[in-house]
Image (tube, coloured by chain):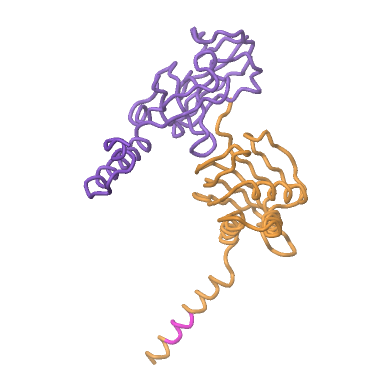
Chain colours: A purple, B orange
C-alpha cells in the first residue's frame, strides 16, 4: 500500500492530528446545532414545490431576529425536536384568514397563490390569528382540509427555512 | 419570663410549620399530584414487561374512569376507561426508550366547594417514540380538570386537553 494512502487511513495519532480532529468535530457540532440541519421531506403536503422524500437543509438563523414574509416556506417544530412541519406562511397576528371554495382570503382580500397548482375546494370559516402566532398551510390542497395539517401556530415553533 | 416568651414563640412557630406540612392546602395537594403524575410517567431505561404494566396501572390511577382525554394530534377525543388507558400507556412505555415528563407554570383555580379544580400550564416532554410521532423534547400547553375523591381525598384528573399545536 502506498505510504500516502496508509497515512490517510491509518494516521499517526500525533498531538497535532488530535487537535485538528477535535477542531473539526467541534465545528461540525456547532454548524449542525446552530446553523444548518439536514431534513428529509416525508409527506406530500408541500407538493409540487417540494417533492416527497426530498433532501434539504434547514437554515436555522433565518428567523431568529426577523419574521418570515408572507409566502415564505418555513420549517416548524411539531412533535419534539425532530418531527418538523414544512409549510407556507399565509397570514400574521391580527389578520383574519378564511378559505372559500379553495381560495384563501386575508382580511377579505383574495390571496394570489401561484404555488397552489392542484385543484382545491376548501371552505374554512374566518379565523383571526392570535398574538405571537402565524397562519401556515401546505401547497398541496388536493386533500380534504380535515386531513391537512395547517393553521394557526405559535411563532416560537419557527425553526428556520429551507436552503433551496 | 423572657425564656418563657421565647419558648412560647418557638412552640407556635413549630406548630405552624407542622400544620403547614401535615395539613397542606388543596392547591398544594394538586401541585403534588402533578409532580407525582410526572414521576410515575417517567421511564429512564429498559424495563420488564411486568414493571411496564405496573407503572401503566399506577399512571392510570391518577385519571378517573371515564375521564375525557383530548389529544388533537392523535385525533383522540374520547372518554377512556381504566383498562383502555392502562393498555395504551403500556404500549407507549413499551415502545419508547425513555420518557421524561414535567409540568411548569401551573395555575390552579379551585371551585367554591373545593371538590373540583381547573388547571392549566406547560407540559414538558422528553423522549423518543417514533410510532407516536414524537422525538426529542417539546413543551405543550395543557388544560386539565381535577376532581377530589371524597373517600380517599386524592385529586384525580377528570379531563385533560393538550392544546393543539396547529389550529385551523
Give the answer, above or below, for where A117 lies relative to A22. Answer: above
Give the answer, above or below, for where B108 lies relative to A51. Answer: below
Query: Which residue is farthest left?
Result: A16
Instruction: Tell me, yes or no, whether the highlighted magenta stretch contains residue B8.
Output: yes
Query: Which residue is farthest front?
Result: A1
Residue drawn at 34 percent across, 30 percent down: A61
Residue drawn at 39 percent across, 91 percent down: B3
Of residues A138 and B92, the one nearer the viewer is B92
- Whether residue B121 is visible, yes or no, is no
Task: Give the number of marks.
Answer: 0
Residue drawn at 46 percent across, 33 percent down: A157
Read off the magenta span.
B7-12
Quadrant holding the C terminus of chain B: top right
Residue A142 x, y percent position in the rendering? 62, 13
With A23 as the anchor, is B167 left or right in this view?
A: right
With B47 as the anchor, is B18 left or right in this view?
A: left
Give the answer, above or below, for where B12 lies relative to B125. Answer: below
Residue drawn at 75 percent across, 42 percent down: B79
Give the answer, above or below, for where B86 lies relative to B10. Answer: above
Quadrant holding the N terminus of chain B: bottom left
Residue A31 x, y percent position in the rendering? 33, 35
Instruction: Tell me, yes or no, whether the highlighted magenta stretch contains residue B166.
Output: no
Residue A156 x, y percent position in the rendering? 44, 34
Q: Main secondary structure of the magenta part?
A: helix
Of residues B95 and A155, the one nearer the viewer is B95
Residue A112 x, y percent position in the rendering? 49, 7
- Whether residue A88 is visible, yes or no, is yes
With A81 as the anchor, is A163 left or right in this view?
A: left
Amino acid at each position: 500500500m502506498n505510504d500516502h494512502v496508509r497515512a490517510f487511513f491509518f494516521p499517526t495519532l500525533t498531538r497535532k492530528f488530535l487537535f485538528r480532529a477535535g477542531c473539526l468535530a467541534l465545528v461540525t457540532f456547532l454548524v449542525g446545532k446552530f446553523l444548518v440541519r439536514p431534513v428529509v421531506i416525508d409527506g406530500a403536503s408541500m407538493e409540487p414545490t417540494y417533492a416527497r422524500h426530498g433532501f434539504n437543509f434547514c437554515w436555522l438563523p433565518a428567523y431568529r431576529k426577523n419574521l418570515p414574509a408572507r409566502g415564505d416556506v418555513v420549517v416548524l417544530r411539531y412533535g419534539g425536536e425532530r418531527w418538523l412541519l414544512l409549510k407556507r406562511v399565509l397570514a400574521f397576528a391580527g389578520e383574519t384568514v378564511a378559505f372559500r371554495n379553495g381560495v384563501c382570503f386575508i382580511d377579505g382580500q383574495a390571496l394570489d397563490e401561484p404555488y397552489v397548482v392542484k385543484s382545491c375546494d376548501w371552505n374554512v370559516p374566518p379565523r383571526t390569528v392570535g398574538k405571537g402566532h402565524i397562519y401556515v398551510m401546505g401547497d398541496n390542497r388536493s386533500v380534504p382540509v380535515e386531513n391537512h395539517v395547517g393553521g394557526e401556530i405559535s411563532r416560537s415553533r419557527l425553526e428556520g427555512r429551507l436552503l433551496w | 419570663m423572657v425564656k418563657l416568651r421565647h419558648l412560647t414563640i418557638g412552640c407556635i412557630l413549630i406548630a405552624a410549620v407542622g400544620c403547614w406540612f401535615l395539613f397542606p392546602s388543596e392547591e398544594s395537594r394538586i401541585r403534588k399530584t402533578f409532580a407525582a403524575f410526572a414521576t410515575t410517567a417517567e421511564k429512564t431505561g429498559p424495563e420488564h414487561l411486568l414493571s411496564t404494566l405496573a407503572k401503566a396501572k399506577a399512571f392510570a390511577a391518577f385519571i378517573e374512569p371515564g375521564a375525557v382525554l383530548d389529544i388533537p394530534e392523535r385525533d383522540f377525543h374520547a372518554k377512556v376507561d381504566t383498562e383502555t388507558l392502562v393498555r395504551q400507556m403500556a404500549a407507549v412505555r413499551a415502545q419508547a426508550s425513555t420518557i421524561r415528563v414535567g409540568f411548569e407554570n401551573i395555575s390552579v383555580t379551585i371551585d367554591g366547594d373545593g371538590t373540583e379544580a381547573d388547571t392549566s400550564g406547560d407540559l414538558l416532554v422528553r423522549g423518543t417514540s417514533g410510532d407516536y410521532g414524537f422525538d426529542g423534547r417539546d413543551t405543550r400547553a395543557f388544560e386539565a380538570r381535577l376532581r377530589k375523591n371524597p373517600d380517599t381525598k386524592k385529586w384525580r384528573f377528570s379531563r385533560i386537553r393538550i392544546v393543539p399545536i396547529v389550529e385551523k
